[in-house]
Amino acid sequence: MNRGTRLSLFGRAFLALLLTIGFYSLALAIAFGLLYLIYLEFVVLGRINIRLTIFALIGAVVILWSIIPRPDRFTPPGPRITRKQFPALFNEIEKVAKLTGQNMPRDIYLVPDVNAFVAERGGFMGIGRKRIMGIGFPLFQLMNVDELKAVLAHEFGHYFGGDTALGPWIYKTREAIIRTTVNVAQANRWLYIPFEAYAKMFLRVTNAVSRQQEFTADRLAAKTVGAQAVISGLQKVHKFGYAFNVFLQNEYAPVIAAGYKPPMLEGFREFLKSPIVTEAVNNSYQEQLTKGTTNPYDSHPSLKERIAALEGLPAGANGNDHPASSLLPADVDLETLILKQVIREEERFSSLKDIPWENVAETVFAPQWSDNIKPFRQILSEITPPSLFDAAQNPSTLFARLASTGKILPPNVKIEQVPQEVQMQVISNIIGMAFAVTLKQNNWKIKTGLGEDLRFVQANKEIAPYRLFPKLAARELSREEWVEYCEKNGLNQFKLE
């Protein structure tokens, strides 16, 4: 570590220590000040005010309880991998570690994320810690070897700069500040004011430092493998990271919850091919490229700022543009490793049934549609497709009936408190499922793909059931056009039940 880095690390360590001391000093001063009020009233003045005493006592207890540091309970973020299992990958990680002048992490994990991270875990407030690294296994599908090495070099840059050494202090203090602020807000709004102000100041200062750490780690990665690989790797992380999370939550997780196990990475590849997803991914990526400024509370600089900071650095020689998946052994089932770690219960994992994605809608979701609309059948039986136009002109009335019949709202939530867009989403889902059940019962075939709207086809006709009610509510179809649509597709004879 050179002299400049030592000075930088010392300055950041001093700042972290100062902010930590400042917070605990503020909290203790307020807590003991409240207790002193009780002492002053009872002992010195010889009287007691019940309301003031309760206020001071509750406030002091809440603050003192909240600032107590909690133990660092580390939960593995994914399956731990070894050199014996992944020799080629470990060789590349070791090369990057040597180029950045860092030791290898003690433990390396595969994680279900389009990203990577490093940290130091264990011990107390960072003392007695060990280095760990997490590598998102979708990166092996999205990147080439050089891009993956750039991502790893960036993470080693956090070790190099001492970021992970300071992390436990900052994270623990941040947790204590947030915990105290939330707890105090519930106890008394006046006591909340100073803690809210300190929390905002702490987040602004520490996140500004965090953003600078990202720039420094980017520069080290560029020096190690070349700026072009770093830029390309950043672009892929920002472009596909959110899409993978949406895929996991909306497509993959519901199938797992139903007891089936489709191929994850194959599904993600198909998900990205969907025109709807492609458009959303490209729009989001272009927005990130044009966003020029960073929010003071962001922990990372914007993509545009990071690319701009790298553009003047050497691009680097053409290296290894083979797919990063070439670093993985052919005889290791990554998805099984990940799922076992996520599910943890061996019995539940063993009960999962393999299923191809093309069978998911028919096998997994179709039975759920029938179960989900059962509470609403009384209302649905009164609705015919042609009459749906009138119901769509007053969605609040229909929502009130569905909510009351299906008892879908918590007891303390009134129908008028539900936002209009939420009401529309609920109605569209229920009507969509009812149409789906009806179409399936009338021999319409499911035709859909990952990331696409559910569709049913028969001969040369096609219906997207979840799109029907929103179209009618938005008056994209007139009454005459809807009647014609129902006649054309033979919907007049159907009942939604």
Image (cartoon, rainbow, N blue to C red):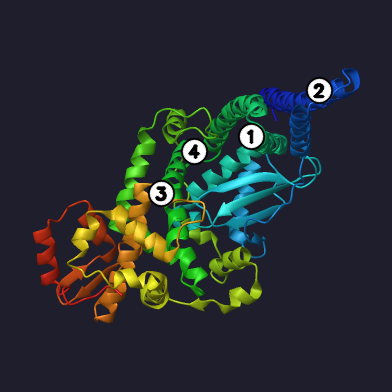
Does 218 sit left or right of 491 as displayed? right
Asked whether, in this view, residue 256 is left or right of residue 74, the answer is left
- The residue mark sitting in front, 3 or 1, is 3
179 over 486 or under it: above or below: above
Question: Do the residues under discs 3 and 1 have CB atoms within 8 angstroms?
Answer: no
Q: Secondary structure at mark 4?
A: loop
Residue 409 x/y as whole percent: 46, 57
Q: Quadrant of residue 477?
A: bottom left
**Residue 51 x %, y %:** 74, 30
Q: Quadrant of residue 400?
A: bottom left
In front of the other: label 3 or label 4?
3
Q: Please give the residue where the numbered disc 1 appears in the rendered image.
A: 185
In the image, taking residue 342 as reference, residue 107 lies left or right, namely right
Mark nearest the camera among 4 and 2 is 2
Q: Nearer the viewer, residue 97 or 410?
A: 410
The residue that label 3 is drawn on is 418
Q: CA distance from mark 3 to mark 2?
A: 44 Å
Q: Is residue 264 visible?
A: no
Q: Nearer the N terminus, badge 3 or badge 2?
A: 2
Label 3: how many Cα within 10 Å (few below 14, some 14–19, many 20+): few
How would you rate the neighbour count of disc 4 (Cα within 10 Å): few for under 14, some for 14-19, many for 20 or more?
A: many
Q: Which mark is residue 204?
A: none
Q: Nearer the viewer, residue 249 or 393?
A: 393
Which of the pair 135/254 is nearer the observer? 254
- Distance, label 3 to label 1, CA atoms, is 25 Å
| SS under mark 3 | loop
Q: Closer to us: mark 1 or mark 2?
A: 2
The residue pinned by badge 2 equals: 37
